Image: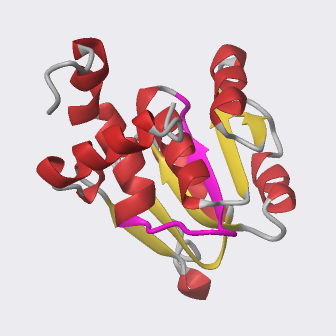
Amino acid sequence: MDKDLPLELLGPLGCGVQTGAGSILLALQAGPGSSVVVFGAGGVGLSAIMAARVAGATTIVAVDLHENRLSLARELGATATVHGGDDDIVAQLRGLTRGGAQYALDTTGNPGVINTAIDALRPTGTVGLVGAPSRPLTLPPSALAQGKNVRGILEGDAVPQLFIPQLLELWQQGRFS
């Protein structure tokens, strides 16, 4: 690492930022034109939103319970936001993603949220799980119908020695901030 880089920038890269960005760029491999829904707009989720923008996703939706987080998500690249307390989240997400998201990322670990993420996927879509489940996860029999995939992700599937310098380069280019 360049010794002139600010320490407050480097610290979060090794955990939350790497997890969120790596989940989108490395594990899920979202690309240009894709649709991404991120459940939870904390540090990991906001990093995922920035990464989706870098990847060229055209639809990037943040879902959270807190309006201040949703507002920040819009500033960082979300093309739409949905309040997590709404009754019709799946219908809203399917509408925003034209039939279902190609990729979803759950940062909450909440089994109900995970099932919502699966329901909001298009056929053959993939949901990545980075949040530690708060209780046992039970999927309904139809959850994996239509080729839907559920994938656990650890630290964004990143090799820190390779990925963190890539994130720093994106930041220096003004593309990841």
The structure residue drawn at horizontal position 55% and vertical position 30%, both measured from the top left corner, is 41
Q: Quadrant of the N terminus?
A: top left
When the figure is inspected, residue 167 is found, relative to residue 33, above or below; the finding is above
Q: Is residue 59 left or right of residue 17?
A: right
The structure residue drawn at horizontal position 17% and vertical position 29%, both measured from the top left corner, is 2
Residue sitting nearer the eye, 106 or 56? 56
Find the residue positioned furthest to the bottom. Answer: 146
The structure residue drawn at horizontal position 62% and vertical position 60%, both measured from the top left corner, is 56
When the figure is inspected, residue 120 is found, relative to residue 134, above or below; the finding is below
On the image, which quarter does residue 59 sit in?
bottom right
Q: Is residue 78 left or right of residue 169?
A: right
The structure residue drawn at horizontal position 18% and vertical position 54%, both measured from the top left corner, is 162
Q: Position of residue 22 (x, y in %)?
A: 35, 52
Q: Is the stretch drawn in magenta largely helix, strand or loop?
A: loop
On the image, which quarter does residue 95 sit in?
bottom right
Q: Position of residue 47 (x, y in %)?
A: 46, 37
Does 97 appear in magenta? no
Q: Is residue 118 left or right of residue 1?
A: right
Q: Position of residue 40 (x, y in %)?
A: 54, 34
Q: Is residue 72 left or right of residue 173?
A: right
When the figure is inspected, residue 102 is found, relative to residue 166, above or below; the finding is below
Residue sitting nearer the eye, 167 or 18? 167
Residue 160 in sight from this viewpoint: yes
Q: Tell me the colour scheme of the image.
A: secondary structure
Count numbered badges in the picture. 0
Does 32 appear in magenta? yes
Q: Position of residue 88 (x, y in %)?
A: 83, 45
On the image, which quarter does residue 157 sit in?
bottom left
Residue 132 in sight from this viewpoint: no
Q: Which residues are magenta?
A: 27-41
